[in-house]
Image (cartoon, rainbow, N blue to C red):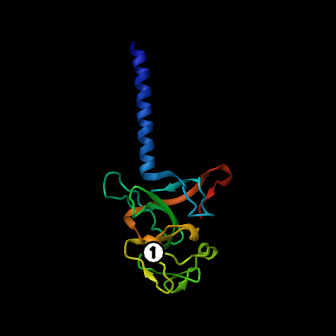
Amino acid sequence: MSLKKKSVLRDWVESIIIAFLLAMVIRAFLVQAFRIPTGSMRMTLIEGDLILVNKLIYGAKVPFTKFNLPAFQQPKRGDVIVFIYPEDTKKDFIKRLVGLPGDKVEIRGGSIYINDKLAAEPVFNQIYYYNRGDFALEGKPITVPEDSYFVLGDNSASSKDSRFWGFVPKRNLLGKALIIYWPPQRIRMIK
């Protein structure tokens, strides 16, 4: 094999390795693609939507460690978040953030009440929320523990969420859903 052929082969191998490493860094720290598997977030997200999630915004996890990068902003009520499912750490879930640490959350008459006041965010006023599960009993508000969040699916009639299994620990946050990028007719920012 000539020196020139070895050089071309080496260039190709180096390019592939660099591209792979760059893709892994982007996926681990910046943005990751996810596919929506169920209708729990209808009509915001529907089955088969492909979305991009900003992993850097809340402080991306450093792979193979328990550390996170510094956050650019704290999660806000109304954000659509992706997190590690507390009951099965091999699964990622996507839901809307309703309760922040220390909030008293109650579902009353199909509406969300935060600290005894009707939730002000317009997105919550467009959905009827059902009192289902041990963490959403009518007349029994719950308080979100420190370093945890209360999340609900936008399709309240068909969502397994905090009403059933409780709270999402802060350490389980993966990122904020940004955009639907596929299918083409559904391309939009996620609100």
Please identify the residue farthest to the left as the structure is shown: 65
Q: Is residue 148 left or right of residue 52?
A: left
Horizontally, residue 125 falls left or right of residue 87, namely right
Question: Looking at this view, is 170 or 47 the one in front?
Answer: 47
Seen in the picture, residue 4 relative to 88 is either above or below; the reply is above
For the N terminus, the quadrant is top left
Q: Is residue 57 above or below residue 97?
A: above
Crowd around label 1: few <14 · some 14–19 · many ≥20 (10 Å): many
Which residue is drawn at the image coordinates 45% and 37% (left, top)? 19
**Would residue 165 be found to the left or right of residue 123 on screen?**
left
Nearer to us in this view, 18 or 129: 129
In percent of width and height, residue 144 lies at 42, 77
Tell me the amino acid under the disc marked 1.
Answer: Leu
Residue 67 position, x and y percent, is: 32, 58
Where residue 94 appears, x then y in whole percent?
Answer: 50, 61
Q: Residue furthest right?
A: 185
Circle 1 SS class: loop
Residue 22 occupies which quadrant of the picture? top left
- Residue, disc 1: 100
Residue at the image point whose x is 63% and y is 57% from the top: 188
- The residue positioned 46% from the left and 85% from the top of the image is 140
Q: Position of residue 3 (x, y in %)?
A: 39, 15
Q: Quadrant of the C terminus?
A: bottom right
Residue placed at 43% from the left, 17% from the top?
A: 5
